[in-house]
Image: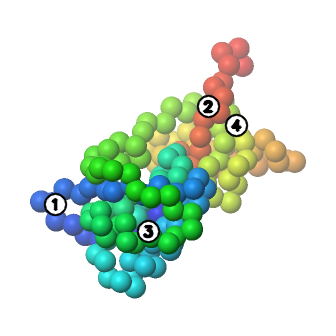
Amino acid sequence: MSEKEEKKTTTASEESYFLIVRTVGGQEYNVALIMKTRIENKNLGIPSLIILPQLKGLIFVERGLPHVVQNLISGIKHCRGMLRGKVPLSEIVKAISRPVEIHVGDIVEIVSGPFRGYKGKVMDIDSESGTVTIEIMDAASPMPITLRIKDVRLLERKREGE
């Protein structure tokens, strides 16, 4: 899963905002799991924690008070503190829903799932369902797999002569 989110319902009149917690790069999930356990044990009323894979070292905490979040992260090994200010929900949505420009013949890298880290060539794109069929390049025999478009990252565009 590319993001960690536990969401409770919110009313339409509440505008969600997020506080940002800094961590050591690559330790976001470990810190988030410790934070989640503390939130559940202390009933702090923080509805969600979000980790965006494209923003290394950051955890977004929804609707937390700064002093509560500061107490929450105190003593966590890989936590580096909090950033000042609040981030509105609209900024998070903008970061998540960026358009992906992938075409048939492009070389992509799989960023989530069991084939994470493998490279492949795009064979087919289904815009309606948001899926892409790629052929793994490192496999001994041609192995086409179908993934969500968000699960791949563009590495190299198809050359015009191919």
Compared to residue 96, the image places residue 59 above or below, namely below
Inspect the image, locate mark 4, and give the three-letter code of the amino acid beneath it. Lys
Nearest the camera: 97 or 162? 97
Residue 20, picture quadrant = bottom left
Which of pointers 3 and 1 indicates the residue nearer the eye? Answer: 3
Residue matched to label 2? 104
Left or right, residue 90 beside residue 104: left
SS of the residue under disc 4 = strand
Residue at the far top in the pictured view: 161
Inspect the image, locate mark 2, and give the three-letter code of the amino acid beneath it. Val
Mark carried by residue 159: none
Left or right, residue 81 beside residue 53: left
Pointer 3 with pointer 1, Cβ within 8 A: no
Residue at the far bottom in the pictured view: 41
SS of the residue under disc 3 = helix
Nearest the camera: 79 or 12? 79
Q: Residue at x 28, y 75 (%)?
A: 45
Which of pointers 3 and 4 indicates the residue nearer the eye? Answer: 3
